[in-house]
Image (cartoon, rainbow, N blue to C red):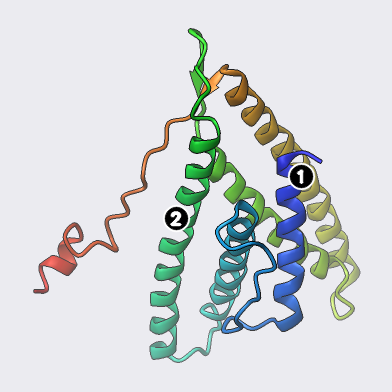
Amino acid sequence: MSFTEHCNAIFSACTDYYHLMDNVDAMPENPYEFKSIDYYLFLKNWIDAVQWHLEDIIRHPAIDPQEALQIKRRIDCSNQDRTDLVELIDSYFLEKYAAVRPLPAATINTESPAWAIDRLSILALKIYHMQQEAERCDAGAAHRKQCHKKLHTLLEQQKDLTAAIDQLLDDIEAGRKYMKVYKQMKMYNDPSLNPVLYGAK
């Protein structure tokens, strides 16, 4: 099993685990060794699963405005946690490949390994929920057929992205590509960079 296939297995298991409780306030029991890469991958998908459902809740047409504001603030915090965790996973790869000397013709990728893995985590959630829609007993045949078609596309996308990330990791390990990680520097959460926040003082 490749590293990325291993990621998919963790993401799928975590997504299933979330839906056993199906509660955005549930506290998960991370089954992996604390601060191991598997621990961070599981946590990554849990954050994504909770945020997925918060995004559903906030779109309820009859939601109380104050509740919607609280959820929006929670989503903002979740986005920051997600970004911090992706950067932490990239630190794992930077350390793992620290001794690799890039070849003279080595090139940089459009995104770091962890940001590509971030998309795999989201795909696991899309696949789970599209599968649910494709099997909905209270939905019409046309809806289920359309969702089966979309599910097929998502599974193909997962397969292609899995192969592409594994190729990227192979290229980095062989020196054909090199990593360069830019911290996201999100400005809206920083009271010294968001003019609305520092202007409110």
Classify mark 2: residues with Cα within 10 Å, few (<14), some (14-19) or many (20+). some
Q: Which mark is residue 83?
A: 2
Q: Position of residue 25 (x, y in %)?
A: 57, 84
Q: Nearer the viewer, residue 17 or 72?
A: 17
Q: Can you say whether 64 is above or below 155 in the image?
A: below
Residue at 8% of width from left, 74% of height from top? Answer: 201
Q: Is residue 188 visible?
A: yes
Q: Which mark is residue 68?
A: none
Kindly state the secondary structure of the residue where label 1 is placed.
Answer: helix
Q: Can you say whether 179 is above or below 54 in the image?
A: above
State the residue position of label 1.
5
Q: Can you say whether 40 is above or below 160 in the image?
A: below
Q: Position of residue 71 (x, y in %)?
A: 45, 80
Q: Nearer the viewer, residue 127 or 1?
A: 1
Residue at 54% of width from left, 21% of height from top? Answer: 177
Disc 2 versus disc 1: distance between alpha carbons? Answer: 22 Å
Amino acid type of disc 1?
Answer: Glu
- Mark 2 or mark 1: whose residue is earlier in sequence: 1
